[in-house]
Image: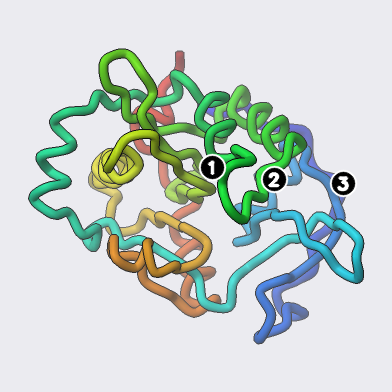
Amino acid sequence: MPIAPAPTPWGFPPRSTWDPDDDLVALGADLEPGTLVTAYALGLFPMPVTLDGEEHLGWFSPVERGVLPLDGLRVSRSLRRSARDFEIRIDTAFDEVISACGSRDRPDGWITPEFRHAYARLHRLGWAHSVEAWRDGELAGGLYGVSVGGLFAGESMFHRERDASKVALLALVELMSDRYADRRVLDVQWQTPHLASLGVVRRPREDYLESLGRCLDLPLPEPFGMDE
């Protein structure tokens, strides 16, 4: 089970003050484990942001949230065939997954060394997880995110072989599709054309926050909730 982090000393703005037309909710604070867990439970996630030429730590709650319904993943026959070629592992190479997701070769990369360090700490405490697709003993692709109760907040994914990241996503959906599936939330932040092709939909902020409130008290899906 996750280890409770030290409480954050920061206070996030109450929802009543969030701009209904702006994804950016707040600036500042830190990436300590307690701050991150508190933020995700409030429906926020961090990303670096540049304002007036200066770098800041931004906290976002998209006006239109990208969510993948667990019964809405579009799985083609070719993807089903590809899935048979990979071995799925959980949390065996978290550092390698986040490093690959944060590679400087990727366009629009935002995962800085500070973010990699922060989420590695969160992983060691049992809050951040990786779902990995392996082939012939090599990491072929995967994803990572934060799991709080029934929420899995997907952060990023990568692939080194065709379909490897999609296979990891398929595995994540399957492990979340337990008896609590109708209340679990798979958050992907924003809907992109690629994610839309996989079944990701946009949900208004208030709808997302309402579903978040219903899922936080759920038990973690296996194997995220298993003791080592």
User: Which amino acid, mark 1?
Assistant: Val
Which mark identifies residue 146?
1
Q: Is residue 100 visible?
A: yes
Q: How far apart in space, not on screen, are marks 2 and 3 (Cα)? A: 12 Å
**Vertical placement of 189 versus 216: above or below?**
below
Here the colouring is: rainbow
Residue 86 pos. (x, y %)? 22, 27
> Of marks 2 and 3, which one's residue comes earlier in the chain?
3
The reply to whether dot 3 and dot 1 touch (C-beta < 8 Å) is no
Number of labels in the image equals: 3
**Screen quadrant of the C terminus:** top left
**Vertical placement of 30 versus 199: above or below?**
above
Where disc 2 sits, the SS reads: helix
Q: Dot 2, how many residues are within 10 Å of its Cα: few (below 14), some (14-19), or many (20+)? A: many
The reply to whether dot 2 and dot 1 touch (C-beta < 8 Å) is yes
Determine the residue positioned at 53% across, 25% down.
96
Closer to the camera: disc 2 or disc 3?
2
> Of marks 3 and 1, which one's residue comes earlier in the chain?
3
Q: Dot 1, how many residues are within 10 Å of its Cα: few (below 14), some (14-19), or many (20+)? A: many
Determine the residue positioned at 36% across, 71% down.
201
Residue under label 3, please give it.
9
Residue 11 pos. (x, y %)? 83, 58
Q: How far apart in space, not on screen, are marks 3 and 1 (Cα)? A: 21 Å
Q: In the current view of this chain or complex, which residue is farthest to the front? A: 105
In the picture, measured across the screen, residue 2 lies left or right of residue 221, that is right
Which mark identifies residue 36?
2
Determine the residue positioned at 85% across, 51% down.
29
